[in-house]
């Protein structure tokens, strides 16, 4: 089976601006129930990625006696650029899904921003997308009569 990434990826990808504040990134993750946000510049070029883990590490410390409100206030003072991972691992939309699986496995990442030939962000493919595919393959729905 030669399934392409563009056939499986989520096309309605949430992204965030490089100069957005960390509190807005956290809100975007929580509101959309997602774990990662591709970071784009003013021309919508992919420049990085920020994850829920990055934000947890940025604001959680067992050594600081702060309220959640105090932590959120601190996040407002910093931009996404300050903690994002630069040059994230990506995959092109015309790549095979099996190649996305291999890349995610060896890179130990839970999702890959998907770019087109011009390098523009056009989607995202995650472990959940891949698991949904495996479920459909192993437990197909019988046709309706």
Image: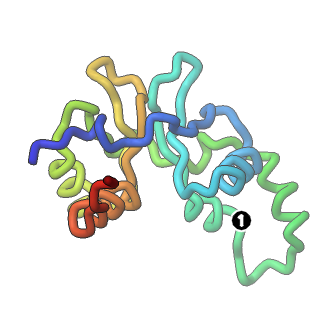
Residue occupying the point 82% across, 64% down = 71
Asked whether 4 or 63 is in front, the reply is 4
Does residue 135 lie above or below 5 as drawn?
below
Indicate the quadrant where residue 126 lies.
bottom left
Q: Is residue 47 left or right of residue 16?
A: left
Residue 92: where, in percent of width, then height? 26, 33
Residue 36: where, in percent of width, then height? 52, 52
Residue occupying the point 89% across, 73% down = 67
Residue occupying the point 57% across, 55% down = 34
Residue occupying the point 36% across, 42% down = 9
Asked whether 26 or 141 is in front, the reply is 141
Asked whether 42 or 34 is in front, the reply is 34
In the displayed orientation, state which residue is furthest to the front.
145
Residue 144: where, in percent of width, then height? 33, 54
Does residue 34 lie above or below 17 as drawn?
below
Q: Is residue 60 left or right of residue 68?
A: left
Q: Which residue matches tag 1?
A: 59
How is the protein colored in the picture? rainbow
In the displayed orientation, state which residue is furthest to the bottom.
62
Does residue 97 lie above or below 20 as drawn?
below
Bin the neighbour count of mark 1 within 10 Å (Cα to Cα): few under 14, some 14-19, many 20 and up: some
Q: How many marks?
A: 1
Asked whether 3 or 96 is in front, the reply is 3
Indicate the quadrant where residue 135 lies.
bottom left
Q: Is mark 1 on a helix, strand or loop?
A: helix
Does residue 89 lie above or below 118 as drawn?
below
Residue 112: where, in percent of width, then height? 36, 47
């Amino acid at each position: 089976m030669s399934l392409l990434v563009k056939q499986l990826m989520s096309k309605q990808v949430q992204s965030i601006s490089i100069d957005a504040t960390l509190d807005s990134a956290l809100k975007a993750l929580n509101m959309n129930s997602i774990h990662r946000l591709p970071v784009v510049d003013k021309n919508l070029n992919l420049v990085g990625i920020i994850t829920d883990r990055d934000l947890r590490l940025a604001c959680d410390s067992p050594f600081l006696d702060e309220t959640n409100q105090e932590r959120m206030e601190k996040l407002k003072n910093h931009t996404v650029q300050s903690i994002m991972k630069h040059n994230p691992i990506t995959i092109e939309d015309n790549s095979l899904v099996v190649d996305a699986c291999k890349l995610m496995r060896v890179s130990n990442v839970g999702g890959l921003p998907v770019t087109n030939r011009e390098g523009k962000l056009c989607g995202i493919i995650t472990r959940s997308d891949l698991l949904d595919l495996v479920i459909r393959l192993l437990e197909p729905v019988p046709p309706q009569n």
